[in-house]
Image (cartoon, rainbow, N blue to C red):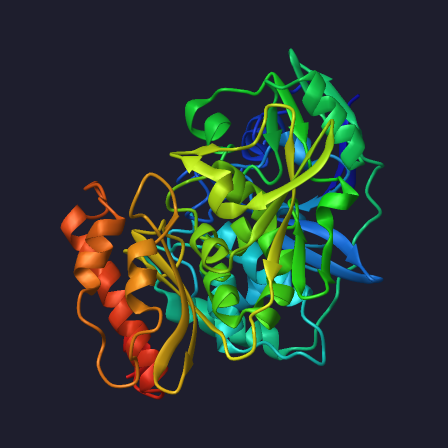
Amino acid sequence: MAIAFVLNGERIEVADAAPSMTVLDFLRTRLRLTGTKEGCAEGDCGACTIALGRQDNGAARWQVANSCILLLSQIDGTEVKTVEGLAGASGLHPVQTVLAESDGTQCGFCTPGIVMSLYALSESRTADAPVGDADIHEALAGNLCRCTGYRPIVDAARALCAAPPMAEPVSVPPEPNTRIAAQGELHLVPQTLSELVALRSAYPDAVLIAGATDLGLIPAKKRQGFPLVLSSRRVAELKRIAWEGDVLVLGAAVTYAEGLEAVETAFPAFGALIRRIGSRQIRTMGTFGGNLGTASPVGDTLAVLLALDAEVELAGPSGMRRMTVADFLTGYRKTALAPDEVIAALRLPRLAEGEQLFAWKLSRRFDQDISTLLGAFRLRVDGGRMMSFAAAFGGMADRAKRASALETLLTGAPWADALPEGIEAALAADFSPLSDHRASAAYRLTAAANLVRRLHIATTRPGVPLELEAL
């Protein structure tokens, strides 16, 4: 079946391009829409940003995505807008005009991506939810500009968002395909969990893709396609966000953007961390199940899931089974997932009465950077004593792990006055980190101990500034 989508208001059908070709390559080489630029080819710089439209309870919503790591099969049945589609018969779009009038562009290479990010920000706002500087900075965090400087760009965003929202309508896209075959590739897009499990059993060697924010680097950087793909993005059961008693259930295909509100409400520290996962372009596509399935030792959500004693549901031919995330992670990018299984959902227990959750990520850049080290802590302090304590770290071992020696040391220990002795020794017993281009082993051990010290300050001396921004 041909890939079909709406591009800048026009229906497009593609039958002669590989489904794992990147959208960026298709736009530039096939359609000659060269306004969308290639910068990093890995979803960091934002020069390739496009907007994806969808209907949300009758309202138009535009989300940004990095076209450099987006597969052509992923835009089947969607509406896409590029910078070429903004200007109309009456002239430039307001976002283009205000950026020019604010001197928000110089060389112009990054400008199309910035225009699309501001377009999505402006078009998706509502009259009863004004856009503040925090929203603007978050919307622009995925767009790098090397020559203009961000002040005039932010000024343009402020001017744009001060005007009443326009709410440009989203078109009705073509019906999505469940089977896409071209150029020797086969991409299957099941609609139900039972269909996905059956296909996984039939094709255990197929590449399983949800958002492709990690796997998309293969066609983008290595120029290699995927001969056989199973996509989970349209499986309704995997998009579930619900409470089952005191457990928040997140379907494996729930994106960071979709799950943010529920997570932030239940676990504010986790929500703040999610806002630092990539950029809006990445959070639009990346999924909670995908982050767990890659089992990266620096996967941003994993340490938090471990600290929460979260569980994972696995679906296979024999039905559903459940295990802790700690048991699911077995080694460096290795999991307990069987070849004929898929991740169905994550289960996050609500914090008990009196419990607190903290999560801190250390990286060279605040936004859009891979963790050097990530610490997550769940604790309950009563009467000046640590009554319960769970700690997990990413970046300290071959996988994200709980710090059992540290937990033993601190559980039941006095906490109100001084930090107990032996933090460094306990961490050294728990972890033997590697040295790599991000940090040395000695730095990681020291930084992990410092996060525990930060935890002590945060829980015993509220109001003491812990970040430079607070000063």
Q: Position of residue 423 (x, y in %)?
A: 21, 64
- Left of 11 or right of it: where is 165? left
Q: Residue at x 74, y 26 (%)?
A: 317
Residue 444 visible (yes or no): no
Q: Position of residue 308 (x, y in %)?
A: 50, 60
Q: Quadrant of the N terminus?
A: top right
Q: Residue at x 52, y 33 (%)?
A: 336
Residue 30 visible (yes or no): yes
Figure check: 88 above or below 36:
below
- Left of 158 or right of it: where is 14? right
Q: Position of residue 382 (x, y in %)?
A: 42, 83
- Answer with the quarter of the image where residue 344 lies: top right
- Tally of numbered tags: 0
Which residue reaches farthest left?
Answer: 442
- Left of 206 or right of it: where is 369? left
Q: Quadrant of the C terminus?
A: bottom left
Q: Position of residue 418 (x, y in %)?
A: 21, 81
Q: Nearer the viewer, residue 422 or 148?
A: 422
Q: Residue at x 60, y 70 (%)?
A: 266
Q: Nearer the viewer, residue 193 or 91?
A: 193
Which residue reaches farthest front?
Answer: 412
Q: Nearer the viewer, residue 141 or 375?
A: 375
Q: Nearer the viewer, residue 439 or 319?
A: 319
- Answer with the quarter of the image where residue 116 lies: bottom right
Figure check: 170 above or below 164:
above
Which residue reaches farthest top?
Answer: 184
